[in-house]
């Protein structure tokens, strides 16, 4: 399948609804008290749209959390995380920047990684304009957004920690794009292997790229993991991606990186958006509370 055929298939997929990787049927128990505005961020690829959430009645330059949505690298948009970004802003007392990054197959690996890094750099450089504290940054995401968040942290560390990223949140991320989805743990509730295989092929061109540490962070060298920001890693027990995320958490810990690991055994991929309301809320509270603790130090 050539790229033009992939683009047409992606267009058709985007017009459909895959609850496993896209959309949200859950929302916070009450409407969070946060102000929302849309901004545009210039990048070397295309201008990126982002929704910015700021807690009400909080003065001064606030820490910032960059949120990257899920969607298998080929679909999704910031609005699917909209109510929860406002929830994090209110509960944490931080600014949340919810990013609309470029998608495959129009933009294949490593373009989304580098664009997300450019966006994080722009946010840091425009801290005064955004009224944020440039020394208190964090990044995180859901599904594919978790993969991109881990990759941005690795890239930033390789560039001498130019950005003060204090924390990373990896919510049921795919971290091994080199292993065939059919060889991963299988569950009735899991993303079908053929779907995962198709999504991966749209994002990654070849086996060499699939083993790159920015595509598959779990394949990163021990040296590449040393000195990365502390992490919260969340997995769902009935998700075929849980094992690789758990392995990454273990590898981070072995490299001396502080890690909070939380598994939700009865949940499937995407549960923070489409799973059990109680577990979803608990996971979002965990994300917010970890950020609050980090930003307070």
Image: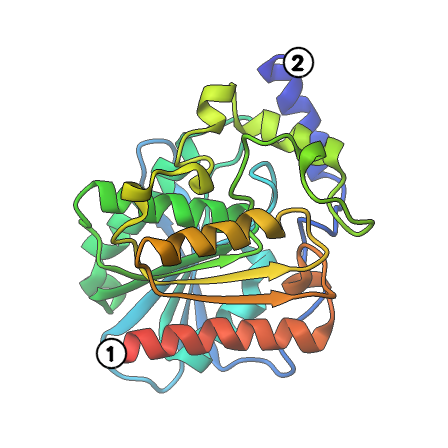
Q: Is residue 84 above or below residue 206?
A: below
Distance CA(mark 2)–CA(mark 1): 50 Å
Q: Residue at x 49, y 27 (%)?
A: 210
Q: Which quarter of the rendering shows the C terminus? A: bottom left
Q: Is residue 234 left or right of residue 23?
A: left
Query: Where's residue 229, x and y in %?
Result: 30, 58
CA neighbours of label 1 inside 10 A, class few (<14), some (14 to 19), many (20+): few
In this view, the residue in front, 261 or 122, is: 261
Q: Is residue 240 above or below residue 182?
A: below
Q: Residue at x 60, y 25 (%)?
A: 201
Q: Is residue 77 above or below residue 165?
A: above
Q: Residue at x 62, y 47 (%)?
A: 241
Query: Where's residue 288, x and y in %?
Result: 46, 75
In this view, the residue in front, 25 or 292, is: 292
Please say whether residue 106 is visible from this viewpoint. Answer: yes
Res. 178 image quadrant: top right
Label 2: which residue?
1
Identify the mark at residue 297; answer none if there is no mark: 1
In this view, the residue in front, 73 or 239, is: 239
Res. 62 image quadrant: bottom left
Query: Where's residue 97, x and y in %?
Result: 40, 60
């Amino acid at each position: 399948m050539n790229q033009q055929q992939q683009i047409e298939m992606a267009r058709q997929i985007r017009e459909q609804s895959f609850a496993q990787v896209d959309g949200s049927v859950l929302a916070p128990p009450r409407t969070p008290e946060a102000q929302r505005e849309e901004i545009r961020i210039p990048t070397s690829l295309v201008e990126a749209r982002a929704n910015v959430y700021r807690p009400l009645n909080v003065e001064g330059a606030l820490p910032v959390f960059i949120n990257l949505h899920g969607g298998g690298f080929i679909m999704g948009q910031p609005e699917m995380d909209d109510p929860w970004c406002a929830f994090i802003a209110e509960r944490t007392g931080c600014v949340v920047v919810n990013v609309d990054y470029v998608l495959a197959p129009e933009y294949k690996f490593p373009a989304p990684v580098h664009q997300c890094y450019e966006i994080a750099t722009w946010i840091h450089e425009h801290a005064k304009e955004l009224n944020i504290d440039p020394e208190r940054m964090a990044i995180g995401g859901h599904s594919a957004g978790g993969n991109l968040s881990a990759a941005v942290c690795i890239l930033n560390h390789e560039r001498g920690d130019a950005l003060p990223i204090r924390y990373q949140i990896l919510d049921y991320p795919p971290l091994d794009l080199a292993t065939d989805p059919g060889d991963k743990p299988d569950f009735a509730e899991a993303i079908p292997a053929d779907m995962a295989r198709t999504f991966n092929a749209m994002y990654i061109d070849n086996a060499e790229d699939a083993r790159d540490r920015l595509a598959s962070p779990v394949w990163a060298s021990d040296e590449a993991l040393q000195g990365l920001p502390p992490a919260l890693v969340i997995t769902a027990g009935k998700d075929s991606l849980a094992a690789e995320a758990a392995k990454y958490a273990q590898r981070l810990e072995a490299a001396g990186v502080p890690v909070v690991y939380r598994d939700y055994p009865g949940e499937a991929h995407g549960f923070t958006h489409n799973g059990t309301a109680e577990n979803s809320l608990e996971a979002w509270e965990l994300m917010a509370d970890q950020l609050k603790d980090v930003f307070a130090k």
